[in-house]
Amino acid sequence: MKLVPAALLPAANAAMQTKHWGTVKRSCSCFATVAAAAMFSIVGAAAPHAAESVSASAVDRRAQAPAIAVTEDGTVHAIWFDKGAVGEADRKGAHVGGGRHSHQAFADLRYARWVPGEAGFSESTRINPEPGQVWGFSISRPVIAADGEGRIHIVYPGNGTSPKTGKSVASSFYSRSMDGGQHFEEPIQLNGDSDEDLSALIMGGLAQAQVFTAMAVSEKGVIHTFWLDTRGMTESMRAALYYRRSDDGGARFEEEVRLQENDQCPCCQVSAVTGGQSSLFVSARQITGDNIRTPTVMHSSDNGITFGAPAETGGTPWRLEGCPLKLTAMAVTPDTIHSLVHNGAEDPPGLLYARAAQRDLSFLPPQKIHPEAAVSDSPAMAGIGATLLAAWHAKVDGPRRIFYRFSLDGGENFLPLQALPTGEASVGYPAVATTLEGRFVLAWQENEVIQVMYLDPPRQGVALR
């Protein structure tokens, strides 16, 4: 990655041009932060421009952890956890003996869509058949994806009762829409049921957990789902990584496969992304050595039939007696896989960006994407051709904000840092999607309302897929 001194940057970045899409919430005249230390940028590139944000969720409800996808007709599809009415506390299970907190949570999964030409999002609908079935946290987020046939696919964590032990468990569920989001099918459980009762080990009211899910959909319409699984867990508190796929758009799933034995950090959400016709990447945090929590990426070049060995994304070894609760964001550009992940061993703790050639997964040394932040976290990434967008939340001075950076050359250089002007609002947990026309869509949580907007990079050098 080429580091460019601040003195070589343009004296002033062009003001962000404003476009109007749907219901106007604010003008996003984002600012550029220029810092000499570890700044990577493209000299002379025009600043990107953004649109206004539109609310996807109701202002009188407590929304959390957005995820978005865009179908080929340009419709933006959003999902999020609904935690109840404003002012209500989270619904959780009872406290467990010894003062330990509950691992149970009860929420709903809501869905809404923004059709091109409409002023804003549709009224939201509930995905889970019965109220309170969703095991909802911002650290175990729902996932949504669209395929070339216009089908919408959703994976989310849910509560249940094991038919084998009769105990409370958390499982991974899948649902799809065949009509562009107007109706969703009855969810199916992805993971098998365990006959182990690990209540004394997991504590918090759960006997098993098969959650922290990921999903990716290939160009061929193959659906890949992953989750962390407590089956076989011992007192070392390490999870296994499971995988299940569908070759027919979600009508039928093959049997689950155990990809990694019990050497995975049990509470760091898995992520997955596809590239081209048959490339599939999955990232989890492996426990190595003396409790070193190491982000890794595995590659399948044959649409999930076989996987290579995990490759470490780099960074200072993070030794931790417990779970970091951090996911790895990934994106693909031609021939390259990109990783963005929080590392608490860095000083200050924050997000590390790394990239590798898809053919060998040899990651280049990672670099801080936001070195001036006191802490940066919750990454999201997406790519269109050689253009890459990275987004995250961070604190610099004042409240936490949503930051982002573009790269126009596949991650070799990045444009200056940008931030959404969210003022004193409580914001976080960004999500990113792309359109067929070469635009990015950004979602985030703001004061427990989900906001969505279009975000355009500079036009020069942008390759449309």
Image: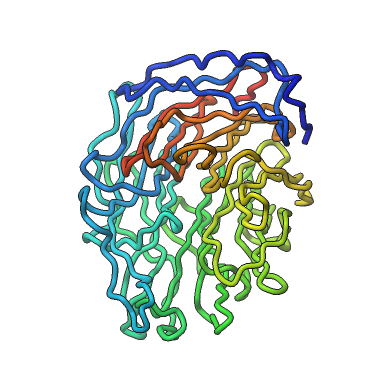
Quarter in which the C terminus is drawn: top right
Task: Locate residue 229 relative to residue 173 in the image: left or right.
Answer: right
Residue 217 visible to an observer of this rendering:
no
Residue at position x 51%, y 46% from top?
A: 221
In the foreground, 95 or 114: 95
* Left or right, residue 269 beside residue 184: right
Q: Residue at x 62, y 33 (%)?
A: 388
Give the percent coordinates (x, y) of residue 422. Answer: 41, 31
Q: Is residue 381 left or right of residue 252?
A: right
Residue 19 placement: quadrant:
top left
Give the x, y percent position of residue 165: 35, 85
Front residue of this view, candidates 232 and 103: 103
In the rendered view, tell whether residue 262 sits above or below residue 406: below
Figure check: 403 above or below 28: below
Task: Where is residue 416? Give x, y as percent.
Answer: 63, 27
Number of marks in the image? 0
Q: Quadrant of residue 332?
A: top right
Residue 54 location in percent, x, y?
A: 33, 29
Asked if residue 262 shows in the view, the reply is yes
Residue 46 sits above or below residue 465 on the image: above
Tell which residue pokes out farthest to the front in this image: 397
Color style of the picture? rainbow
Which image quadrant: the N terminus?
A: top right
Tell which of 398 and 232 is nearer to you: 398
